[in-house]
Image (cartoon, grey):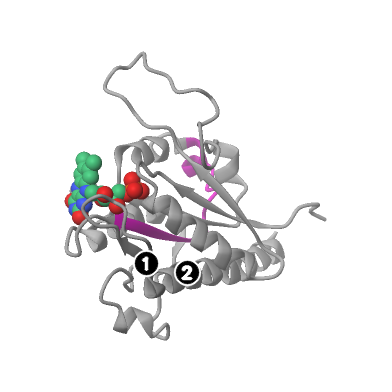
Amino acid sequence: MRDTLPYVLILYYSRHGATRAMAEQLAAGVESCPGVAARLRTVPPVSPTCEAVDPEIPAEGAVYADLDDLRNCAALALGSPTRFGNMAAPLKHFIDSTSALWLNGALTDKPASAFTSTSSLHGGQETTLISMLLPLLHHGMVYAGLPYSEIEVMNTTSGGSPYGASHVAGKRSDRPLDDDERHLAQAQGKRLARLALALDAMRREER
Ligand SMILES: Cc1cc2nc3c(=O)[nH]c(=O)nc-3n(C[C@H](O)[C@H](O)[C@H](O)COP(=O)(O)O)c2cc1C
């Protein structure tokens, strides 16, 4: 018997708050699914100065993730601002510390997805989502994008794609999520929560 709810780890990096706003919408979607909790975690920035260390608790927002957050999750949503069409270095830096989990298959058969924010509409959202998919596949996770049954995937004129939720934050990273982007972020969180329950039950049955 477990004494806590299975949780979806929403692990993101955000410099200016746009990706964080998306993470909060995914969390709302997760929490709309009974029996699953959302756990928001972030990662510290990285610095070219090796000696620079960040305080253990960030000044605002979610606390920093540790490997146990990842090891024990029932599902994972990875979020990053787009940087040159790729995920941001702080998130990649954290992922590169997960070899121990890879070695013992801790994330195998768990559902995962990705979300991103860009300044421009064609600034590389899809490539960034795919860059986040790659390490998830190496970990044996089951990737879940967004199905076209969410009609906003077809109708959006901003963010949101079959590869995952996304947001166009504008030049100053201050454009709020619009209705389609918000809906799709929540739908992705909810879908991940449902898949988390289903695959959690499957893994328990096999044990
Ligand atoms: C180094 C760097 C590279 C970036 N590369 C891109 C890019 O390739 N395409 C794009 O549209 N925006 C790019 N941006 C802008 C961010 O993706 C955008 O401002 C994002 O919404 C920031 O998210 P945040 O508010 O969560 O930090 C870049 C920003 C930085 C600092």
**Residue 71, quarter of picture:** top right
Q: Position of residue 32 (x, y in %)?
A: 63, 70
Measured as percent of width and height from the top left, residue 49 is found at 29, 17
Mark 1 element type? loop
| Left or right relative to 181: residue 168 | left
Tell me the quadrant of the picture where the N terminus can be found: bottom right
**Is residue 29 at least partly visible in the picture?**
yes
Magenta stretch in the rendered image: 100-117
Q: In the rendered image, which quarter is residue 183 located in? A: bottom left
For image coordinates 40% across by 79% down, the residue present is: 147
Q: Position of residue 165 (x, y in %)?
A: 38, 66
Amino acid type indicated by mark 1: Gly
> Is residue 107 magenta-colored?
yes
46 horizontally vs 109: left or right: left
Q: Is residue 111 visible?
A: no
Q: Residue at x 53, y 72 (%)?
A: 191
Amino acid type indicated by mark 2: Gln
Find residue 32 and name its label: none
Residue 141 included in the magenta stretch of the image: no
- In the picture of the structure, the residue carrying the numbered disc 1 is 164
Task: Answer yes or no: disc 1 within 8 Å of ligand 1.
Answer: no
Tell which residue pokes out farthest to the top in this image: 51
Contact between labelled residues 2 and 1, with CB atoms less than 8 Å apart: yes
Relative to residue 173, is residue 186 depicted above or below? below
Q: Measuring 53% from the left and 38% from the top, which residue is drawn there?
A: 65
Residue designated by label 2: 188
Asked if 134 appears above or below 43 in the picture, the reply is below
Q: Where is residue 95 drawn, in percent x and y?
A: 40, 40
